[in-house]
Amino acid sequence: ELSSSQTLSHDGGFFNRLEDDEVALKDGRIERLKLELERKDAEIQKLKNVITQWEAKYKEVKARNAQLLKMLQEGEMKDKAEILLQVDESQSIKNELTIQVTSLHAALEQERSKVKVLQAELAKYQ
């Protein structure tokens, strides 16, 4: 039969073991949490790098878009200038043609008058 002091020391050992187990569990959990944190930190760093890369690409694209817009605007200005030149050219051609048509009309009227005179002369001899 066990004496009371043996039972006490036996129980004390049990509690010590229980406490040791708890400490081990706690240590294990802390280790796991530390590892998890390290993994998360690494993931965050990776994501930060990705963000940095995307920001750089975004800046490139933004710069390229600005350049394209500038080129388009310059192109539009050139196109507008060319169109204005063409309109101006067309206007002077139109003016020239108007002058020619007017003078041709005058010449036609003169010819008609001559024809009438000649017809009148011809009627005299018939």
Image (cartoon, rainbow, N blue to C red):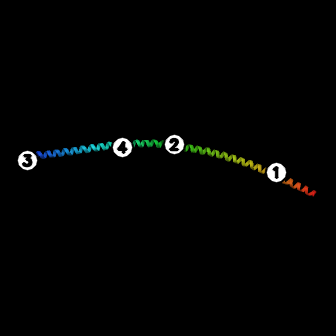
Q: Position of residue 83 (x, y in %)?
A: 64, 46
SS for callout 2? helix
Compute the Cα span from label 3 to label 1: 148 Å
* Distance in Å between CA atoms under marks 2 and 3: 88 Å
Residue 85 in picture, x, y percent from top left: 66, 45
- State the quadrant of the C terminus: bottom right
In the rendered view, tell whether residue 43 sits above or below residue 122. above
- Mark 2 highlights which residue? 64
> Does dot 4 land on a helix, a strand or a loop?
helix
Mark 2 in CB contact with mark 4 (< 8 angstroms): no
Q: Quadrant of residue 55?
A: top left
- Distance from the alpha carbon under mark 4 to that under mark 3: 57 Å
**Tag 4 or tag 1, which sits nearer the N-term?**
4
Q: Few, some or many C-alpha atoms within 10 Å of disc 3 (few <14, some 14-19, many ≥20)? A: few
Q: Which residue is mark 3?
A: 4
Residue carrying label 4: 43
Which numbered disc, 3 or 1, marks the residue that appears first in the sequence? 3
